[in-house]
């Protein structure tokens, strides 16, 4: 993709649909991406590739679709476990070991969601697990779906408030199953994919990992770091960019769009053509376009 003339291509490599905790169906998502004048969009639902086929069927002309996922991972540090997210692009969705891991993670998310609801109900909060499950519509279940039930019950006014310390951010937060980050990177590479560390400095979501770990991950096969993201301050974005430069990693920027579950819009942050082309060159699955 070259742009010697005209505006630079707009590339957003991190979005969610109803296949996980976004609010637009995969078809609505790709249409909205075209309406937002994106040239490339990646669909990266949590722990699933379930949205790929319908996003592909609905792909508007000229929009390129990067098929991906965002994997729930963990790093076991000296003093604590840190949960982190790994974006995986253009991998083989039928790779047996990866499929098995994603299936395990989704099943564990359902068990954990139900346990959170049990805790809430024990405190007299009237939310229903079956209603939350049906709200997720068969997609990967996450706390945003429980947040919706709290909003419907009139207990909080917004998703943001539902993620506060009195609710799903702390008091009713339970850990979720995940994949060891080194194993996840190996698995994504084994499946022909390209692993990029999502929002690595997003400290308001919880503890973050040290730069020394990121250096080890680069040696283990990590391809890139997401620098431009709404959960990073300008200083954190520059830090991630500099670290990527030192380690020879590519840098991405993305919206992490979740529909109305978050306020950020499609294309709010974007990725350079150079980084996009490196990802395309390393991935086993083609970028789709019609
Ligand atoms: P879970 O995957 O179930 O642990 O839930 C985490 C998801 O909740 C993330 O992927 C975001 O989509 C969403 N999330 C986390 N923090 C917030 C927040 N402060 N406001 C809105 N959504 C959030
Ligand atoms: Fe999410
Ligand atoms: Fe994430
Ligand atoms: Zn995300």
Image (spheres, rainbow, N blue to C red):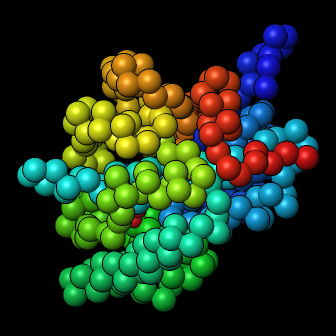
Residue 128 at what x, y percent from top left? 42, 86
Is residue 149 positioned above or below 193 on the image?
below
Between 186 and 48, the one nearer to me in the picture:
186
Is residue 199 positioned above or below 93 on the image?
above
Between 190 and 62, the one nearer to me in the picture:
190
Residue 188 at what x, y percent from top left? 51, 54
Residue 233 at what x, y percent from top left? 36, 26
**The residue positioned farthest toward the top in the image shown:** 4
Quarter of the image with the N terminus in it:
top right
Inspect this view and state whether residue 177 appears: yes
Left or right: 167 in relation to 152: left
Inspect this view and state whether residue 158 appears: no
Between 187 and 162, the one nearer to me in the picture:
187
- Total marks drawn? 0
Seen at 26% across and 68% down, the residue is 175
Q: Quarter of the image holding residue 217?
A: top left
Seen at 24% across and 82% down, the residue is 119
Seen at 57% across and 58% down, the residue is 191
Left or right: 258 in relation to 277: left
Is residue 81 positioned above or below 277 on the image?
below
Left or right: 146 in relation to 137: left
Seen at 44% across and 77% down, the residue is 104
Residue 41 at what x, y percent from top left? 70, 42
**The residue positioned farthest toward the left in the image shown:** 79
């Amino acid at each position: 993709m070259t742009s010697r003339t005209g505006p630079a291509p707009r590339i957003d490599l991190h979005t969610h649909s109803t296949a996980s905790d976004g609010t637009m169906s995969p078809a609505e998502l790709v249409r909205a991406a075209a309406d937002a004048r994106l040239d490339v969009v990646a669909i990266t639902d949590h722990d699933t590739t379930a949205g790929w086929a319908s996003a592909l069927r609905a792909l508007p002309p000229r929009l390129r679709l990067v098929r991906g996922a965002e994997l729930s991972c963990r790093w076991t540090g000296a003093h604590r476990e840190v949960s982190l997210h790994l974006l995986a692009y253009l991998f083989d969705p039928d790779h047996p070991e990866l499929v098995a891991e994603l299936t395990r993670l989704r099943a564990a998310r359902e068990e954990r969601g139900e346990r959170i609801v049990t805790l809430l109900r024990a405190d007299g909060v009237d939310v229903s697990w079956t209603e939350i499950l049906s709200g997720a519509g068969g997609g990967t279940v996450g706390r945003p779906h429980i947040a919706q039930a709290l909003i419907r019950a009139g207990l909080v006014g917004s998703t943001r408030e539902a993620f506060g310390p009195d609710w799903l951010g702390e008091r009713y937060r339970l850990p979720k199953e995940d994949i060891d980050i080194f194993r996840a990177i190996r698995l994504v590479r084994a499946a022909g994919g390209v692993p990029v560390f999502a929002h690595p400095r997003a400290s308001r979501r919880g503890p973050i990992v040290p730069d020394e770990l990121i250096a080890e991950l680069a040696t283990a096969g990590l391809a890139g770091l997401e620098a431009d993201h709404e959960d990073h301050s300008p200083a954190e974005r520059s830090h991630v960019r500099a670290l990527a430069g030192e380690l020879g990693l590519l840098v991405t920027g993305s919206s992490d769009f979740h529909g109305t579950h978050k306020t950020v819009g499609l294309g709010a942050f974007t990725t350079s053509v150079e980084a996009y082309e490196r990802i395309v060159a390393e991935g086993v699955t083609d970028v789709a376009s019609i």
